Image (cartoon, grey):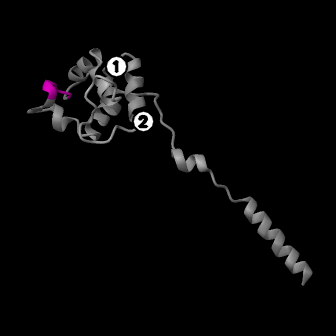
Amino acid sequence: MKKITNLLLLMACLSMGGCYYDVEEELYGATTCDTTHITYSVTINGIIHNYACLSCHGGASLQGGFSLLTYADVKAKVNDNRLWGAINHASGFAPMPQGMAKMSQCDINKVKAWIDAGAPDN
């Protein structure tokens, strides 16, 4: 009987050693933000569409008097710092997207990486 108890105790200890709990992963998410290979056509345009920016800044609806419909439109907002200031909620800029939560930090980082690369039309 003592051998069985010891065996069960040993198995319990070994199985507990296999358990892993990562608090950091739970708090900050398991995925990382990849800011390499950022393109306007996929990444930046996708972010603009994802946050419904075109409902206010595309087509017939031009809130704030500007469009984000084309690359040239977005590039103009990069050149005058309005895009970065708005999505980063910087002082002196209207925080965007308006009426919604701030973009995810990963998406903000992607936009920043694209801007830092010269905001290429790729």
The secondary element bearing badge 2 is classed as helix
Residue 74 x %, y %: 25, 23
Image quadrant in which you'd find residue 62: top left
Q: Nearer the viewer, residue 41 or 74?
A: 74
The stretch in magenta equals: 64-68
Cβ–Cβ below 8 Å for labels 1 and 2? Answer: no
Instruction: Judge whether residue 88 is colored magenta.
Output: no
Residue 35, placed above or below residue 12: above
Residue 4, placed above or below residue 98: below
Q: Which mark is residue 119?
A: 1
Q: Does any portion of residue 65 appear in the rendered image?
A: yes
Give the left or right position of residue 98, taking residue 90 as reference: left
- Mark 1 or mark 2, which is nearer to you? 2
Q: Does any portion of residue 30 appear in the rendered image?
A: no
Q: Nearer the viewer, residue 96 or 3?
A: 96
Secondary structure mostly taken by the magenta-highlighted segment of the chain: loop
Instruction: Judge whether residue 67 is colored magenta.
Output: yes
The secondary element bearing badge 1 is classed as loop
Q: Which mark is residue 105?
A: 2
Residue 6, placed above or below residue 60: below
Image quadrant in which you'd find residue 120: top left
Real-space Cα separation, disc 1 to disc 2, in angstroms: 19 Å
Give the left or right position of residue 29, taking residue 5 as reference: left
The residue depicted at 26 percent of the width and 19 percent of the height is 75
Inspect the image, locate mark 2, and give the three-letter code of the amino acid beneath it: Gln
Q: State the quadrant of the N terminus.
A: bottom right
Q: State the quadrant of the C terminus.
A: top left
Inspect the image, locate mark 1, and give the three-letter code of the amino acid beneath it: Ala
Q: Which mark sits nearer the N-terminus, 1 or 2?
A: 2
Residue 40 x %, y %: 32, 27
Residue 66 x %, y %: 16, 24
